[in-house]
Image (spheres, helix red, strand yellow):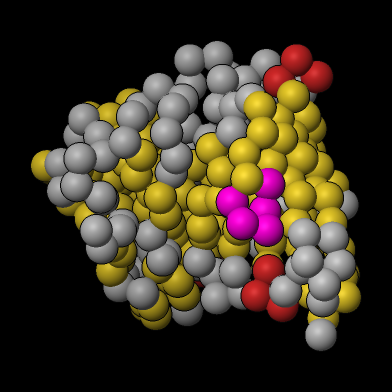
C-alpha cells in the first residue's frame, strides 16, 4: 500500500514564528487532506487539497501531486496551534478511505 | 449542522463485557468510516460504509468486532467480548462523497478503557 511520511515528527516553536510541515507519499493520489488533532483529541479537517494551493487564515497548504508531496504552512503561530498535524491519502487507486501518516507534533510556547 | 455525533464520550468496562459505540453522521453524507487510534498504531481504519453498505471491513481486527449501519443516520461498532488491548479512542467520520473527494468530518471520539 501507499506509504505516507511526515516530517518533522516533533516541532517546538516560539509563539509568532512560522513553520512548514511536510508530507511525502509514495504513489499518485487523487485526494489529500490535512488534519489537526488538538490537545483535547479532536480531529479537525484543515484542507482537502489533492493539488494546488489553498489558504485559510494563517494556514496554507500546497500539494505538488507530480512530485508526491504536500506542505502545510503555519504563519505567526499561536499556542492554540499546538497539537498533532496529520496528512492523509487514499491507500490505493480507487480507494475511498484515507491512510494517515504518523503526524507532526507541534508545540507552540509563549 | 451539529457535526458527527458519537456516544458515549468515555466508556470504562470490564474485560469480557459487550461494548457498543454509536455514531450519527452528518445528514446528506453518504460515506461513514470507523477509525481506531492508539499510541502504538496511530489512526487505523476499521470499516467503511457507503450508502449504508459495508464496503471494506478488512481493518476490523477480529471477529469480536462488528459494525452495522441500519440507516443513513446511524451506525454502531460493537465489541463482544471486550479485551484490555481494545482500549483506544474510536472515531467515526463521515464524508459527503465516497470516491476520494470531499473532506472528512470526524466526531469527537469515544475513549474506551477495558480493565
Q: Residue at 36% of width from left, 74% of height from top?
A: B9
Q: Position of residue B90 (x, y in %)?
A: 44, 59
Q: Position of residue A85 (x, y in %)?
A: 68, 55
Q: Quadrant of residue B53?
A: top left
Q: Does A59 lie within the magenta span?
A: yes
Direction from residue A34 to residue B10 in the image, left or right = left
Q: Residue at 25% of width from left, 34% of height from top?
A: B30
Between residues B36 and A98, which one lies in front from this camera angle?
Answer: A98
Direction from residue B30 to residue B110 in the image, left or right = right
Q: Residue at 54% of width from left, 37% of height from top?
A: A48
A69 vs B110: above or below: above
Direction from residue B37 to residue A21 in the image, left or right = right
Direction from residue A102 to residue B49 in the image, left or right = left
User: Secondary structure of the magenta portion, mostly?
Assistant: strand
User: Taking the image as drawn, is residue B56 in sight?
Assistant: yes
Q: Which residues are magenta?
A: A56-60
Q: Position of residue B33 (x, y in %)?
A: 38, 42
Between residues A32 and B32, which one lies in front from this camera angle?
Answer: A32
Q: Does B2 lie within the magenta span?
A: no
Q: Residue furthest bottom?
A: A110
Amino acid at each position: 500500500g501507499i506509504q505516507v511520511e511526515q516530517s518533522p515528527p516533533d516541532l517546538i516553536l516560539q509563539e509568532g514564528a512560522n513553520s512548514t510541515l511536510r508530507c511525502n507519499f509514495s504513489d499518485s493520489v487523487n485526494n489529500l487532506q490535512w488534519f489537526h488533532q488538538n490537545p483535547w483529541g479532536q480531529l479537525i479537517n484543515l484542507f482537502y487539497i489533492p493539488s494546488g494551493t489553498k489558504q485559510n487564515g494563517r494556514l496554507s497548504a500546497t500539494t505538488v501531486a507530480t512530485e508526491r508531496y504536500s506542505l502545510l504552512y503555519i504563519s505567526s503561530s499561536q499556542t492554540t496551534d499546538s497539537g498533532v498535524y496529520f496528512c492523509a491519502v487514499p491507500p490505493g487507486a480507487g480507494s475511498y478511505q484515507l491512510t494517515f501518516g504518523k503526524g507532526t507534533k507541534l508545540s507552540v510556547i509563549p | 449542522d451539529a457535526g458527527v455525533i458519537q456516544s458515549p464520550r468515555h466508556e470504562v468496562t470490564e474485560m469480557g463485557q459487550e461494548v457498543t459505540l454509536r455514531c450519527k453522521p452528518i445528514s446528506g453524507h453518504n460515506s461513514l468510516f470507523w477509525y481506531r487510534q492508539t499510541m502504538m498504531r496511530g489512526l487505523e481504519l476499521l470499516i467503511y460504509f457507503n450508502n449504508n453498505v459495508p464496503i471494506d471491513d478488512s481493518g476490523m481486527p477480529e471477529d469480536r468486532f462488528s459494525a452495522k449501519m441500519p440507516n443513513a443516520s446511524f451506525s454502531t461498532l460493537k465489541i463482544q467480548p471486550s479485551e484490555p488491548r481494545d482500549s483506544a479512542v474510536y472515531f467515526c467520520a463521515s464524508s459527503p462523497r465516497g470516491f476520494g473527494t470531499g473532506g472528512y468530518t470526524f466526531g469527537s471520539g469515544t475513549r474506551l478503557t477495558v480493565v
